Image (cartoon, rainbow, N blue to C red):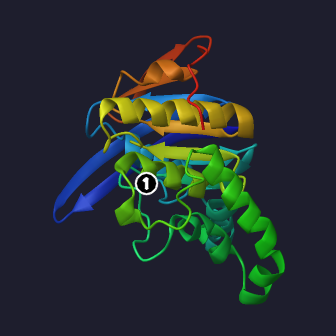
Amino acid sequence: MLRAENLSKTYHRHAVQVRVLSGLNLEVKTGEFLSVVGASGSGKSTLLHLLGTLDAPDSGAIYLDGRRIDNLPARDRDALRNQTFGYIFQFYHLLPELTTFDNVLMPAYIAHSTPGWWKSRGRWRARAEELLRKVGLGHRLKHRPRELSGGEMQRAAVARALLTHPRVLLADEPTGNLDADTGGEIVRLLRELNREEGVTIVMVTHNMDIVSATDRVVRMTGGVVSDDTRRPAPVPHLIAV
């Protein structure tokens, strides 16, 4: 479904060049829950940004269903980021002035003109309510981020990422800002949504305690995939939502 071929990426910091990816290759299967692990600076987050077209490689190519996407016009890449890819980050990025419900609706606000939003708002509002119930926040629709715990904010971010029925969910250290128990709940929730929503997930993490809930683990070293561990997916203990 998603393929990276010979990706290279170098960042320029003043007079210093920092080579992050060095000819990386990776394939992600449809419906897979993939973990990408590695030491800090190994290029994990850079890889995720390239896969989701948030950044462009210096060389190499990225394909979605056999179609190259890294060199698409900006308008087409914007559409991919709004409709095909969902993103979860370590620091939630919820807008503090909006309620949980409106934060989850934000991708739909962005995707539509004002007339288009008013025409389809009932469908999107129903979708947002469904997702918030699914992640255990059905009672928190009117609360603002400052009134939520860290785990609740990350659950809201998960719901927001899934609003537009994305095919691929890219999660960058989604448990990095949470305690061990809450982080485990978030990963079990992602596994449940992976199965219920049929969404493909690529998760970057440094926490080896949570990767057992995923289908496959790849390790990055020196800007390339140095190890690829395939195994049958375990059956996790799902949380009640």
Residue 156, image x, y percentages: 51, 54
Q: Choose between 171 and 179: the one closer to the eye.
A: 179
Q: Is residue 211 above or below residue 13?
A: above
List the single residue furthest toward the left.
15
Give the quadrant of the N terminus: top right
Give the quadrant of the C terminus: top right
Amino acid at dot 1: Met
Residue 162, image x, y percentages: 64, 52
Q: Quadrant of residue 78?
A: bottom right
Q: Residue at x 53, y 68 (%)?
A: 142
Q: Residue at x 32, y 41 (%)?
A: 178
Q: Choose between 78 and 179: the one closer to the eye.
A: 179
Q: Choose between 197 and 82: the one closer to the eye.
A: 197
Residue 22, image x, y percentages: 39, 39
User: Circle 1 is placed at which residue position?
Assistant: 153
Answer left or right for 38 relative to 61: left
Answer left or right for 45 relative to 236: left
Q: Secondary structure at mark 1?
A: helix
Q: Residue at x 39, y 72 (%)?
A: 96
